Amino acid sequence: MNINEARKYLEKLKKEINYHRYNYHVLDRETISAAALDSLKNELFALENEYPELITSDSPTQRVAGSPLDKFEKAKHSRPMISLFDSFSETDMFAWQERNENYLARSLKEKYYCELKLDGLAISLHYESGLLVLAATRGDGQVGENVTTNVKTIQSIPLSLRKPEAKELEAVGFSNLEIKNIFNLLESGVIEIRGEAIMAKKVFADLNKKYLNEGRPILANTRNGVAGSIRQLDSQVTTERKLDFYAYDLLLGDYERGEVVDTKEKLDSLVRLLGLKVLVDNAVCKDLETVFSFFKKVGERREKLPFEIDGVVVKINNLKMWPILGIVGKAPRYMMAYKFPAEQATTKIKGIVWQVGRTGALTPTAILEPVAVGGAIISRSTLHNFDEIERLDLRLEDTIIIERSGDVIPKVITVLKNLRSGNEKKITPPSVCPMCSGKVEKVKDEVAYRCLNKHCFAVSLRQIIHFVSKGAANFDGLGPKLIEQFMASGLIKDAADIYNIKKADLLSLERFAEKKADNVIEMISLRRELDLARFIYGLGIRHVGEETALTLAEMISNQGKFPSKTLTGKVQLSDFLKISDLTTSLQQKTEEDLAQMEDIGPIVAESIYTFWRDKKNLMVLEKFENNGVILTLEKKSKNKSKNNALTGKTFVLTGSLSSLTRDEAKDKIRALGAKTKESVTKDTDYVVAGESSGSKYDKAKILGIKILDEADFLEMIKL
Ligand code: IVH
């Protein structure tokens, strides 16, 4: 983007943000989720960073907080109602602790106090001589709105503070002097309690049901329900909304933090004794590790909680530390909002891939500019069918809002059409199948476009399953079900595509949590180095089984070492073989050359010959190489000693061995220069008979072939 394009785009972005901000902050109407709005603001911030000369004083990035509504009397806060810094990961939290330690120039051994971060509206309550005289919203942090009348309808807010018994305060750990000071403030001082006004999920659902019946506009979410109830002038409406209030802070007259109450835990106990509600979930955590397990447990309970929360607020429990650490910019150093990942974000559509399902139905998947949403980086989103593209009026390069919560697959919620530049491109369904180039048609009365080639999906599926199977690339844990899911979601069309799968792609699929995605990615990276014979076998060339693949691999290995370039560009002889070298090597062979090799007859030779000349196959081979697959040359054939007593011998395995799998046994045999065969003939030298061996054993007996039990075999391969 050049500066002129940036200027134009910035204007559109600011207009869009301002429109949603106005609705949200002034009209209490949510026209876009807070998370999606944040995402747009981040984009604006990044662009302004790139072009600082384009920052204007009215840019939304230059604004600190909301402003109070004119319809309310203003209320100046005695101490500013500041904001909180946000963290989204354990790394962020460690960085926060480290910043504090650097600031103090010493290690910080303080305990933390973890509280649920309620998603409502911050309210400050002023009690003079124990009586509620003022309730104010946060406003811009300095001046809020006087919403006393409305707040007085909240049943859990006492109109006068409870006077605790001295012994109740003693039991919590207050000294006589501290108790005296508290009593004095209750008698003739100012006590300020800050907390969050909330709407329970059940109240929200019931109200919306009622509004729907009455044909009234429904509430967008609980936070909006609270704000809309408190920041309007009819206190009857507030009563109807059945709000609740939980306190999270207490300011005692002019006392410094830590002076009368020394820990946040004790502060909560005092607030309870004064007659207000404090969340029972709050807890002291001895270090960040304990904070993380608190956060995890809360995350697991989040759905079941009766109210909405958007994270945990982590505070240093020792209140004496608060003035020492102080405030930086808009928020204090001594507490941190550790937030759950945002479930919506904005990003751009970079492309569309059409996946072909089992039934031949073509489904579009949007390829996205990678974006963090719902705790993961996402790079694709299914669009279900072409109708969905038309319904959203989706075009390439459009900015969209994407949503992902928990492990649910991400979906495109809406297109932000106001941000279009005019260069967006219409999306059309493909005319031929992306998998088999077969004819595509829209079936009458159906939403789906279909590939008319009945075998399209099944053939490719079978080929890929063969490639990942045990005898070939041996992808443990990448079974047929997963392969089918990858294909059905358009992630892979052939085996080479497996090596291009990214974690973000997997997280975009159904039933893919973080851990499973990590395991698959690790498996793929481990299988980037493949044994030549296994690779050839995995290609699924007609008539080329494991033995023939081995013959071909040995022939290639015996041609000597292969040159490969090192990072410095020097040519080096290596034990690795590039796929393009394999292709060249096999393309040099005529059908006759191939037919002269051991175990290869004219039919097999023709099949091999044709395979290495087929355009589609060559493209897949090239893709394997581009995706970083490299072949290892058989160590075993190089180690093969002419003196080895087993060189050239033929083994047949039957039954199961207890210390080796069949594949491992085969590998050992081949490493010693011998061969394995599937059936017993007069040319068989040894039959290895494991547990419950069957007809092969009987045949070996009849033919008088040497039969080895497991112990004999292990002894023999020690050679
Ligand atoms: S302490 C310096 N504790 O989160 C601000 N805030 O994102 C002190 N909130 O404006 C706030 N639960 O309205 C604190 N347990 C909790 C909270 C909490 C919700 C809200 C609060 C604040 C906002 C900041």
Image (tube, rainbow, N blue to C red):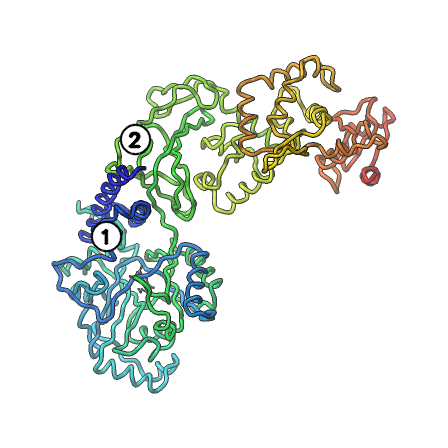
Q: Specify the quadrant of the image occupied by residue 243.
A: bottom left
Amino acid carrying mark 1 in the image: Leu
- Observer-side mark, 1 or 2, equals 2
Q: Quadrant of the C terminus?
A: top right
Q: Is residue 375 left or right of residue 574?
A: left
Asked if residue 571 is positioned above or below residue 12 in the image, the reply reads above
Q: Earlier in the sequence, mark 1 or mark 2?
A: 1
Between residue 48 and residue 274, name the one nearer to us: 48
Q: Is residue 210 visible?
A: no
Q: Which residue is mark 2?
A: 424
Left or right: residue 178 versus residue 433 is left
Q: Residues within 10 Å of mark 2 (few under 14, many from 20)?
A: some
Question: Label 2's element?
Answer: loop
Q: Residue at x 75, y 32 (%)?
A: 638
Give the quadrant of residue 543.
top right
Q: Position of residue 153 (x, y in %)?
A: 19, 64
| Residue 548 image offset from top left, x and y in percent | 70, 23
- Which disc is residue 332 wearing? none
Horizontally, is 146 left or right of 258 in the view? left
Q: Is residue 526 above or below residue 282?
A: above
**Residue 330 image point, x, y percent:** 30, 61
- Classify 62 as above or below 163: above
Q: Which residue is mark 1?
A: 207
- Label 1, label 2: how many angstroms apart (C-alpha)? 42 Å
* Type of amino acid under label 2: Glu
- Residue 317 visible (yes or no): yes
Q: Residue at x 18, y 70 (%)?
A: 134
